Image (cartoon, grey):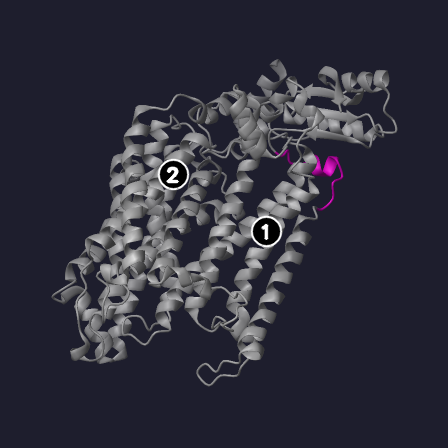
Amino acid sequence: MSEKIYGIMAEFDSPAAILHAAEKVRDAGYRRWDTFTPFPIHGMEKVMKLGNSLVGWVSLALGAGAFMSVVGLIWFANAFDYPLIVGGKPMFSVPMTFVPSYIMLIMGSAVGALIGMLALNQLPRLHHPLLDNKRFEAASRDKFYLVIGATDPKFNVTETKKMLEVVGGKQIEIVEDKD
Amino acid sequence: MAESATNLEELKKLLPPAELRRAPVVEGNKGLGWLTDKLCVFAEGKTPLWWWILFIPAAFAATVIFPVCLFYQVFTGVGVWGNNHPVMWGLDIVNFIWWVGVAHAGTLISALLFLTKQHWRTTIGRMAEAMTVFSVMMAGLYPAIHVGRAWFDWFMFPVPNSNDLWPQFRSPLMWDVFAVNTYLVVSSLFWFMGMIPDFAVLRDRSTTRIRKGIFSFLAMGWTGSARHWHNYEKAYVVLCGLCTLLVFTVSSIVGLDFCTAQIAGWHATIFPLYFVIGAVFCGFGMVLVILIPLRKWCGLENVITKSHIDKVAKLALVSGLIIDYIYMMEFFIAWYSGDPYERWVFGHRLFGHTYMVMGWILIGINVLVTQLLWFKKVRSNLALLFIIGVLINIGMWSERFVIVVGSLYQDFLPSNWGKYMPTRWDIGLYIGTLGAFFMLYLLFVKFLPMIAISEVKGVTPQADPHHPLGGAKKEAGHE
């Protein structure tokens, strides 16, 4: 069992404090860092330059796929494999497929949104080094954490610690990765 | 500290006068930690007596009455119900529409009010979603057993099979299969996804190994990272949009089941809208019935405030008024069409010999009782609102009875007329589904985060980085 350093964690008391600290950490040139908060802080995605989330595209892709598959299925079932005359109407027409395929579009997009969210977040995961840390339990309560990862090119235990102190972090500690 | 205090004083001067201010989402808020404790305490504390008093009869109905009625019907046949020619759609379809209706207000509150940025919805959204999920389960059961041979239900799904059987996709009844199943899946996904961050809260607070294990499993390793929240919020908006579409789709399709038939009283283009609004109205009644006792018993009066209940009551009033308008239009069009069958059916809704009581319950509750909600005194009287909520549910149930049975029992040929009376198996199954619904709901309230913890925290001033309570300083440039 080798014990590596996962990163350095600093605690903040308010959303404004962590937002300003994040701005400074970004300006200092760090890349592999993240903030952990009990709720989304608005403005953080701009500070961290997260851009637009890809979840919408995953959802659209699955929704559109489901829509087209059901159109195809209806054509196959009611017009090709077993042609069915209903009320003297054509075997296949686009409007007749709309309602079931639209509903399956909703189903596909919803599944896509959830799966996309989980996949992009790399969830479910069985373990995370931060979840071993007793103090980190307050991240779902009323404290805000900024963690700079050990894989960051600028990471240096003493300098990073000092920097986190300067930006107002409290309870600065090293998080270990027990693998 | 001193600086933020002066900031607060200055900020107060800038606020609009008291009557124009928005009510705070959480009353008497003492900070994020306090709020977390308050919202978790019921799921973590000792089970109170009232919970058992409600749970035992509900569980009896769900585990004894429900399976007995269900299996007796499945093994014997639909004949054990009162359904017979000409009333082939009896209480099973009435209850199906009623349960779908109950579901709709939940989705409307959690999805549509999110898209319109109503912060107060965060406090009641989760409870409304749970109501949706459980009532769609109950709704979906009815058509599945109404077909008579429940073991052939798979015929409704497009499964390749050796008989070369495919569903007929032009039928609204077929669309219903898709709609109800999609509604169940999507509302469950939405409900579950909303709970992931709250599972993490309960995981981090858990004291026993078992609790920790269960909630760690459910939270799936959620850490609250900004990257996670970023994707999560996007997924949440997308799901809200999709759920809003479902509010308007599912009941519309149930309405189409009726209006594509030629029966007088059903064959009207207003039906999809009629069913959507009726569903929402009925659901708001159920929301009042569930919220008013639970906020008191679970000690959530500061979170689900009177102002939130007032807003739900106002929404009930709005949907009730639209329903009243639709009733007027239905009667007017029946008269104006000059169609003798339409006139006959609508006349008999109120003055017929067999089911006129149901027609007057419909008018008495959905038209008259609803008007009470105009008054602020009524909307702030919780006991009265609870009774109105129960009455709305009864009123909407009788509306569905009037539509389904009232249109079928006397059709075009007098020799084809008949009567319908529900049997004990009809009623037993309804009691069973009510029991199952309330049993599931009580289990949800006791074991799962019944308030969206992270969402409620997210709309408090303490969570706003530009608010003094969120730590903003004057020189930050946000005045």
Instruction: Depth check: give the residue in front, B184 or B211.
Output: B211
Q: Position of residue B212 (x, y in %)?
A: 55, 25
Quarter occupied by the C terminus of chain B: top right
Q: CA distance from mark 2 to mark 1?
A: 24 Å
The residue identified by callout 1 is: A111
Position of residue A70 in the picture relative to residue B175 (left or right): right
Task: Name the mark on residue B441.
Answer: 2
Q: Nearer the viewer, residue B309 or B287?
A: B287
- By secondary structure, the bulk of the magenta-drawn segment is best described as loop
Q: Position of residue B362 (x, y in %)?
A: 23, 57
Residue B365 in view of the camera: no
> Which residue is farthest bottom?
A88
Q: Position of residue A117 (x, y in %)?
A: 65, 44
Q: Is residue A7 above or below residue A63?
A: above
**Mark 2 nearby-residue class (10 Å; few <14, some 14–19, many ≥20):** many
Residue B300 picture location, percent across and down: 40, 28
Name the residue type under label 2. Tyr
Q: Is residue B285 above or below residue A34?
A: below
- B202 relative to A171 in the view: left or right: left
Q: Nearer the viewer, residue B317 or B93?
A: B93
Q: Secondary structure at mark 1?
A: helix
- Please tell me which residue is depicted at 62% across the width and 52% down the height of the picture: A112
Q: Which residues are magenta?
A: A40-52
For label 1, count other residues whose C-alpha is less than 10 Å away and answer few (under 14), some (14-19) or many (20+): many
Answer yes or no: is residue B198 visible: yes
Q: Residue at x 18, y 74 (%)?
A: B417
Circle 1 chain:
A
Q: Is residue B54 magenta-colored?
A: no
